[in-house]
Amino acid sequence: MDEQKATTGKKDFDLDGLIRDEKFLLMNKMIVRDLNDYRSSPSFTLYTKDDITKYLSNPYKYEKQLRKAVVYIYGASPHFRRLIQYFAGLNDLSYIVSPYRIDPKKANVRITNNNYRKVLNVLSSMSIKTQFPRILVTCLREDVFYGTMHITPDSITIQQLPSDYCSISTIEGNVPNVTFNFQYFDAHPELLDFYPDEFAAKYRKYKDGIVKRWIELDAPTSFAIKANSDILDYAIPPFAGILREVYDLEDYKQMKLTKTALENYAMIMMRLPMDDEGNYLIDYDKAKAFWGNLDAVLPEEVGSVLTPMDLEKISFERSHTGDTDTIADAEQNLFTAAGVSSLLFNNEKASANALLLSIKADQAITFGIVKSIEDMVNRYIQYQGYGKNFKVTFLDVSPYNRKEQGDAYLKAASYGLPTISLYAASQGLGQAELDSMSYLEGEVLNLVDMFKPLRNSAQMSSDEINSEGDGATPDGGAPQKDIGDLTDSGEQNREDGDDW
């Protein structure tokens, strides 16, 4: 019997399962940089304004160079980085799950509820609030985010693919599919283990000569999100057109720095006296020695010169009348070229109405990318058997219009419209937490009864007031005021019996 148990135990040992567990652990700890591999060190190029002009002249030909230039400037220019982050923050990625292609009169409540919970669990495992902002930033910066999913029972991790080895060739379910250049692993074979199993299988086919190097990845686990969805042939960063303005701003800063340095520089002139016939009135060697002594004690910011002639200052400075701040103008031109109001970025002429209208216009740009993300999520959800009758809808809500949208949903709910989930989502409480938090606070913690608010006479009926004996009139109403709180006319009315 013991031998049989031992044999059974060996059979129960799942080697494939162990390998899968190791693979899972490997995926949960993805290496983003191997410090022992010199090849993993990023390299940067300082692009000139002429380079940017050249790349913009043919964005299809210089797609990779333009993308790298944008990534470099994103790290080097605080103005450009703030602009991208501003647009990325114009949507807080609030969402609701709603029935899709379902007849409420025929649907089974239990099955619908079970499938609904599964959809919510999948969305929770995606960590939308933390993973999807990276997609927004990448799309606003580079135009396209290429991604693939690592799927486990507890989490769905989105891994960004190297853009230089990705392209878009087909669209499925209104979502662009990714075509990947598997030559990438010829140069980085050590990274193959950190990609889903699909990559290893297709890489073997490529190495065996069965397929060519460009292979389309499986949908819906791989996808592309594009900011300029009307241009699919190549990637064109949405704000590539303002790169020259970014360089202009840096040029103006350097010019102002040089101007300030020159203005802080001084010169002392030692003039040799001469008679009317042009003869020096002091020995030249002595004068030179005096000048040397003077020059030796002067600070670096002060220069000296020995000359027999008068010197005249020639200045190229503007007159102070009507002078303008070229750096402020360059900053305003930068944001104007980006299509946003400079009032949003520390402009002293900021107006509340102008800011509100500008933000609403900018929000539409970000929301267009969010709707593409919505299509990607719905394609994945509806590929699953439990999710075919549900869809995810992202709300056009941001920190700038949260109150406005919340009030609209709340008002609609007061008229009987089913917008309770919309209101909760707009305030940061998703459907996955809505009823569970109500259960936790009401049933488990009993917070509803624990934190009952104090009641006053304005909230009580006359019977409740009289039963508590707080001095109210028999017919209801407020309790009598103290004598000190009455006016002269009030005291007279009480004496006359008008006030009970």
Image (cartoon, rainbow, N blue to C red):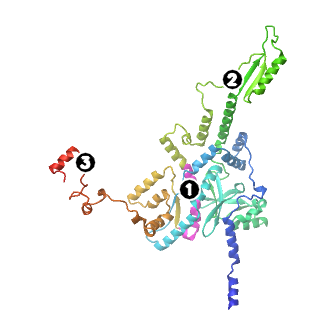
- What residue is drawn where x is 74% and y is 20%? 269
The quadrant where residue 1 appears: bottom right
Identify the image quadrant of the C terminus: bottom left
The tag on residue 320 is: none
- Gap between marks 1 and 3, in whole Å? 65 Å
Q: Nearer the viewer, residue 391 or 489?
A: 489
Q: Which residue is mark 3?
A: 484
Crowd class of label 1 (few under 14; some 14 to 19; many from 20; radius 10 Å): some
- Residue found at the very far top of the displayed protein: 276
Secondary structure under tag 1 reads helix
- In the image, residue 365 lies in the stretch drawn in magenta: yes
**Was residue 14 drawn as part of the magenta stretch in this picture?**
no
Dot 1 or dot 2, earlier in sequence? 2
How many marks do you count on the picture?
A: 3
Secondary structure, magenta segment, majority class? helix
Residue that mark 2 sits on? 315
Asked whether the residues under the numbered discs 1 and 2 touch, taking CB atoms below 8 Å apart as contact, a structural biologist would say no
Could you say where residue 97 lies in the image, as x and y percent from the top left?
A: 51, 63
Few, some or many residues within 10 Å of mark 2 (<14, 14–19, 20+): few
Highlighted magenta segment, given as a residue range: 364-388
Q: Is residue 168 above or below residue 322?
A: below
Q: Amino acid at mark 3?
A: Gly
Count residues near mark 3 (Cα–Cα under 10 Å), then give few for <14, some for 14-19, many for 20+: few
Q: Amino acid at mark 2?
A: Ser
| Residue 27: percent from left, percent from top | 68, 66
Q: Distance from label 1 to label 2 (Cα)?
A: 57 Å
**Local secondary structure at mark 2:** loop
Disc 3 on helix, strand or loop?
A: helix
Residue under pointer 1:
371
Q: Position of residue 268 (x, y in %)?
A: 73, 22
| Residue closer to the observer: 312 or 362 | 312
> As drawn, is 87 to the left or to the right of 197?
left
